[in-house]
Amino acid sequence: MTDTLIAQRVADELEIRNLVARLAQLADMGDLNEYVSLFTDDASWEMPGAPRRGRADIMAGAQERRGGGTTGPGSNTRHVISTLSVQTDGSDEAIADSYWLFYGSTTSSPAVLLMGHYHDTWRRLADGWRLARREIAFG
């Protein structure tokens, strides 16, 4: 493997790691337009009982969660990402697997409400890496 290929794989991994973190931060307290911009146009969000297809549908789901007080500013919730691995091979697709914890009551008595696993497929576009598919498992 050449130094150039190694450098590209490291840069890709770092960008994807930052995007996984940024998605969690935006879900909790950020702008939903920026949140949705991190997905491909044809992205799929595979959460048990609440699958979503495409940016507009993913936006609708995020707005519903915020509207219901489940996530977002004022909900006192946080997504915490851990144990993240990214597999890149120099192509325009990469896989990331991570564990997540979803906390409630973060301003008083933080408690884990849910936990699980993300299996993400990332696709490189002209403007950078975007999430093409997120498979969410609970437990």
Image (cartoon, rainbow, N blue to C red):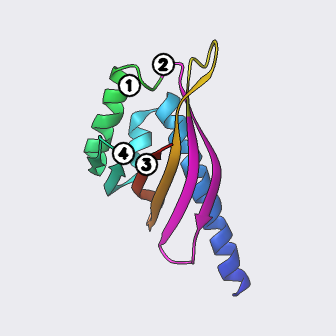
Instruction: Give the distance between the C-alpha atoms of the residues marked 4 and 2, in whole angstroms.
Output: 20 Å
Callout 1: 10 Å neighbours few (<14), some, many (20+)?
A: some
Image depth: mark 4 or mark 2 in front: 4
Query: As rendered, which of 30 and 86 lies closer to the eye?
Result: 86
Q: State the residue lying farthest toward the front.
A: 139
Q: Are marks 1 and 3 in contact (CB under 8 Å)?
A: no
Q: Which residue is mark 1?
A: 66
The disc label shown at residue 47, or none = 4
Q: Earlier in the sequence, mark 1 or mark 3?
A: 1
Callout 3: 10 Å neighbours few (<14), some, many (20+)?
A: many
The disc label shown at residue 75, or none = 2
* Amino acid type at mark 4: Met
Instruction: Give the distance between the C-alpha atoms of the residues marked 1 and 3, in whole angstroms.
Output: 19 Å
Q: Quadrant of the N terminus?
A: bottom right
In the figure, residue 104 lies in which quadrant? top right
Image depth: mark 1 or mark 4 in front: 4
Q: Determine the secondary structure under disc 3.
A: strand
The disc label shown at residue 136, or none = 3
Q: Earlier in the sequence, mark 2 or mark 3?
A: 2
Q: Are marks 1 and 2 in contact (CB under 8 Å)?
A: yes
User: Is residue 95 shown above or below 20?
Assistant: below
Instruction: Give the distance between the C-alpha atoms of the residues marked 1 and 4, in whole angstroms.
Output: 16 Å
Q: Are marks 2 and 3 in contact (CB under 8 Å)?
A: no
Instruction: Confirm whether the magenta stretch covers residue 76.
Output: yes
User: Is residue 115 shown above or below 16?
Assistant: above
Start-end of magenta stretch? 73-101
Instruction: Give the distance between the C-alpha atoms of the residues marked 1 and 2, in whole angstroms.
Output: 8 Å
**Would residue 22 appear left or right of 134 to someone viewing this image?**
right
Q: Going 40% across and 47% down the picture, which residue do you hit?
A: 37
Q: Position of residue 4 (x, y in %)?
A: 68, 81
**Which SS does the magenta portion mostly show?**
strand
* Amino acid type at mark 3: Ile
